[in-house]
């Protein structure tokens, strides 16, 4: 059994082997990146529109209304993307990436999700969000 190291995201200090971040969402960069006390987490396996793309601002607003100033738990993959940790984040035990996809604000990024969200994609999202080439 692997030990779980939980970091309360308030100081911004991170342990090299951390597997989980728990904290209040202080900022939403876009639909697929949230910050917990200054710790940026990229949601694993979702492909959201950039802010400059069609529905990008609307998608960010959706995520902000969902999680801003609320406590989330992020299970980290151990990988990084630029300045962000990568993980699956939960609000009240519900995957916020899945919520965004189910509501038409993101797509499944099969390369990283293993297809876990493909059944949640909406026709409107498929038609309006350009899937990233890396997915």
Image (cartoon, helix red, strand yellow):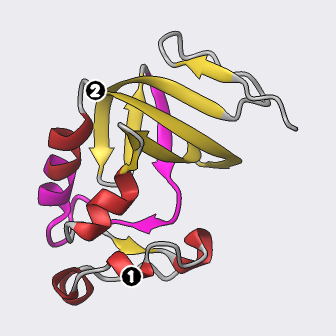
Question: What residue lies at 61% left-to-right and 75% top-to-bottom?
Answer: 114
Depth order, front residue of 64/3: 3
Q: Is residue 27 above or below residue 96?
A: above
Q: Position of residue 106 (x, y in %)?
A: 30, 69
Task: Please state the extent of the stretch shown in magenta in the rendering.
Answer: 38-61
Alpha-carbon neighbours of circle 1 within 10 Å: few (<14), some, or many (≥20)? few
Q: Which callout, 1 or 2, points at the residue further toward the start of the chain?
A: 2
Question: What residue lies at 23% left-to-right and 58% top-to-bottom?
Answer: 51
- Give the label on residue 63, or none: none
Alpha-carbon neighbours of circle 2 within 10 Å: few (<14), some, or many (≥20)? some
Depth order, front residue of 19/82: 19
Q: Position of residue 11 (x, y in %)?
A: 53, 10
In the rendered image, which quarter is residue 119 located in? bottom left
Q: Position of residue 14 (x, y in %)?
A: 66, 21
Q: Is residue 80 above or below residue 9?
A: below
In the rendered image, which quarter is residue 27 located in? top left
Question: What residue lies at 19% left-to-right and 58% top-to-bottom?
Answer: 59
- The residues bearing labels 1 and 2 have C-alpha atoms spaced at a distance of 27 Å
49 part of magenta stretch = yes
Q: Nearer the viewer, mark 1 or mark 2?
A: 1
- Give the label on residue 119, or none: 1
Q: Tell me if residue 121 can be seen.
A: yes
45 part of magenta stretch = yes
Residue furthest out toward the right: 1
* Quadrant location, the N terminus: top right
Q: Tell me if residue 84 can be seen.
A: no
Question: What residue lies at 62% left-to-right and 15% top-to-bottom?
Answer: 13
Task: Tell me if 71 is positioned left or right of 124 in this view.
Answer: right
Describe the element under mark 1 as helix, strand or loop: helix
* Residue denoted by label 2: 70
């Amino acid at each position: 059994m692997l030990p779980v190291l939980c970091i309360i995201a308030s100081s911004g200090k991170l342990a090299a082997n951390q597997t989980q971040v728990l904290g209040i969402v202080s900022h939403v960069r876009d639909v697929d990146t949230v910050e917990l006390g200054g710790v940026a987490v990229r949601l694993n396996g979702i492909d959201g529109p950039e802010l400059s793309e069609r529905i990008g601002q609307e998608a960010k607003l959706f995520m902000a209304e969902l999680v801003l100033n609320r406590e989330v738990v992020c299970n980290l993959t151990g990988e990084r993307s630029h300045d962000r940790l990568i993980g699956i984040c939960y609000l009240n035990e519900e995957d916020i990436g899945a919520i965004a996809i189910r509501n038409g604000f993101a797509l499944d990024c099969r390369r990283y999700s293993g297809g876990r969200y493909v059944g949640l994609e909406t026709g409107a999202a498929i038609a309006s969000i350009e899937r990233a080439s890396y997915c």
